[in-house]
Image (spheres, rainbow, N blue to C red):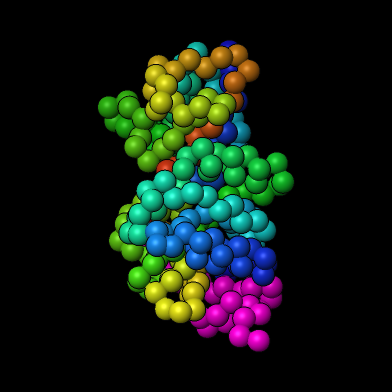
Amino acid sequence: MLQLPAQVYTQIIGHCLSGLPDEACGLLGGDPESGVAVKCYPTHNEAASAKLYTVPGKEFLHADRDAEAHGMAIMGVFHSHTHTDAYPSPTDVAQAPDPGWHYVLVSLRDVLPMLRSYRIVGGRIDEEPVVVDGEPEPEGSVPGGGQ
Amino acid sequence: MPVEVRLPTVLRPHAGGQSTVSANGGTIGEVLNDLVASYPAMAGQVLTEEGTLHRFVNVYVDDDDVRYLEQLDTKVPDGATVSILPAVAGG
């Protein structure tokens, strides 16, 4: 399970929307084992592409240091799919760097962003529940939206 | 001189769960080979069979990416920190 504070959730969605028309990406700081995310580290997309993303190595380095300084670890990565489902692509699976990480996908195909999270171990993809501030993630909506 | 090597989460199980270990060497190549000698399970994940840096790994001396310096011949000054991180990319 992935637990996201509402602030982190909205940061992820906001960063993905601001990256359009390209894919956007970033890292999550927290506890990989419990799945509790504490901090969002939005990064540039070095690939500057609507189909690919690359987290700049130096931004990863700085996020990693910050996470460690605050008693956390980098526990996952998020990126957007601009025109497809929130499901890992073959490239995502082939290049998944860490079986302990949480892989968050945000689909921007429809009007409302759709966030999903997965574990990717040895090429196998397993979706996991996402809880935002103790509440299950609403279907295709941003918390507080549609009020 | 021993240098501090920061490990990514994916490599920590190969070093008893430690996030930072000590390794010896005056260049990145020497430091990584010493690291692999101490923790053989890291062998295929840091260096290739040919002894080059694995393409999905980035290595830094303090803030500098060794790929933009002298790769495995990059010097590691006394007191420097070596960081190993996986490349993060997808589609």
> Does the magenta segment cover residue A143?
yes
| Magenta segment, prevailing SS (helix, strand or loop) | loop
Viewer-closest of B32 and A68 = A68
Viewer-closest of A143 and A135 = A143
Viewport quadrant of the C terminus of chain B: bottom left
Which residue is drawn at the image coordinates 39% and 19% (left, top)?
Answer: B70
Q: Is residue A82 left or right of residue B79?
A: left
Image x and y of residue B79, in percent: 63, 18
Which residue is drawn at the image coordinates 49% and 74% (left, top)?
Answer: A113
Numbered disc total: 0
Image x and y of residue A105, in percent: 46, 66
What is the magenta range?
A: A122-147
Asked if residue B61 can be seen in this view, the reply is: yes
> Does the magenta segment cover residue A116?
no
Which residue is drawn at the image coordinates 43% and 71% (left, top)?
Answer: A107
Viewer-closest of A10 and B31 = A10
Q: Is residue A76 above or below residue A6?
A: above
Viewport quadrant of the N terminus of chain B: top right
> Image quarter for residue A145?
bottom right
Residue at the extreme right = A70
Q: Is residue B79 left or right of residue A119?
A: right
Which residue is drawn at the image coordinates 60% and 14% (left, top)?
Answer: B78
Q: Is residue A29 left or right of residue B56?
A: right
Image x and y of residue B67, in percent: 39, 27
Q: Is residue A24 above or below residue A54?
A: below
Residue at the extreme bottom = A147
Viewer-closest of A49 and A64 = A49
> Image quarter for residue A68?
top right
Asked if residue A122 can be seen in this view, the reply is: no
> Image quarter for residue A51?
bottom left
